Image: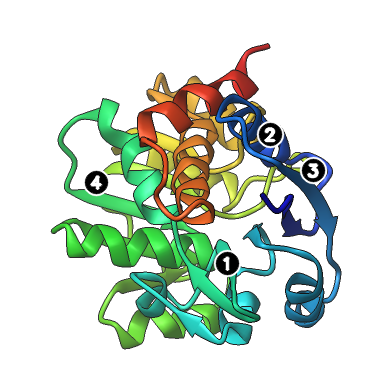
């Protein structure tokens, strides 16, 4: 049996626990494979490196949309999203999928019924959540610092705002999809705006994981139930692994092994 090689592309990438998650699953399911981290500054070099060295890969910020453009074929909801986070080397062709959206859905189930969602940021993760959740019947609003990246959402009929023209409403869930707070102490949106948002919201999620970000700390100040992105990371990883191994294993088994990466 061939020794498979997997990686995760990103910048920054040192914080990623994806290798730990996937290695637990690889070992637990007795597969011959390695999973590494690949720091990639120039996203347009991704395809050449991937097809030369790897059987499968995950993609994180800021390369999800570039990876989508480079794919030979995109399958499933990733085609509508315009961003991929999972890659398969299929006979020398780079095939892209997106498991972020379904992973995020599984992470929100504990919050119960929701209808109105506010997404902070307009990158690949925001696209995945927005399109997937609208298909499920949710009302999704996106706010971003600048208007340029909002064009994608506007063309699809989403309600969008910049910081300057944001109109406050009530939201069931507020999601930070930006990297603010990952390696710094920034908020994803000016503090006064975020305070007003939290006053009229029910839950908050930061897609950043294993860290109490300034976004989540502020949510705590408003006694807003919140969580980081660990569950989203777990579930998108399980679904990615399922693609890596062509649906050979039960998702519950993959999940049980990957969960070990989150035990401190």
From the top left corner, tell me how far across and down residue 213 is, in percent.
Answer: 64, 33
Q: Residue at x 61, y 30 (%)?
A: 30
Q: Which residue is mark 2?
A: 23
Residue bearing the label numbered 3: 183
| Mark with earlier residue (4, 2) | 2
Q: Which SS class for mark 3?
A: loop
N-terminal-most mark, 1 or 4? 1
* Numbered disc in front, either 4 or 2: 2
20, above or below 126, in the image: above
Q: Is residue 181 above or below residue 65?
A: above
210 sits left or right of 251 in the view: right
Q: Which residue is mark 4?
A: 170
Q: Residue at x 15, y 35 (%)?
A: 113
Which mark, by number, is residue 97? none
Label 1 or label 3, whichever lies nearer to me, is 1
Q: Is residue 163 visible from the viewing direction of this image?
A: no
The span from disc 4 to disc 2 (Cα, nearest Å) is 42 Å
């Amino acid at each position: 049996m061939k020794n498979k090689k997997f990686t995760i592309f990103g910048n920054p990438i040192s914080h990623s626990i994806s290798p730990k998650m996937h290695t637990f699953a690889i070992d637990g399911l007795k597969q011959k494979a390695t999973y590494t981290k690949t720091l990639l500054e120039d996203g347009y070099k991704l395809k050449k490196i991937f097809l030369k060295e790897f059987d499968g890969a995950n993609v994180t910020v800021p390369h999800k949309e570039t990876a989508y453009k480079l794919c030979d074929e995109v399958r499933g909801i990733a085609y509508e999203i315009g961003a991929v986070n999972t890659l398969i080397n299929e006979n020398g062709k780079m095939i892209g999928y997106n498991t972020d959206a379904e992973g995020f859905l599984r992470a929100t189930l504990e919050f119960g019924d929701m209808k109105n969602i506010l997404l902070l940021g307009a990158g690949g993760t925001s696209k995945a959540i927005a399109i997937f959740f609208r298909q499920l019947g949710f009302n999704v609003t996106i706010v971003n610092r600048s208007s340029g990246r909002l064009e994608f959402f506007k063309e699809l009929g989403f309600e969008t705002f910049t910081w300057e023209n944001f109109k406050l409403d009530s939201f069931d869930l507020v999601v930070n999809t930006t990297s603010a707070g990952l390696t710094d102490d920034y908020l994803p949106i000016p503090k006064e705006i975020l305070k007003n948002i939290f006053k009229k919201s029910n839950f908050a999620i930061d897609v950043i994981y294993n860290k109490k970000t300034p976004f989540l700390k502020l949510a705590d100040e408003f006694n807003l139930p919140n969580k980081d992105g660990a569950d989203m990371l777990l579930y998108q990883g399980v679904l990615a692994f399922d693609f890596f191994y062509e649906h050979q294993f039960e998702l519950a088994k993959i999940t049980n092994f990957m969960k070990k990466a989150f035990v401190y």
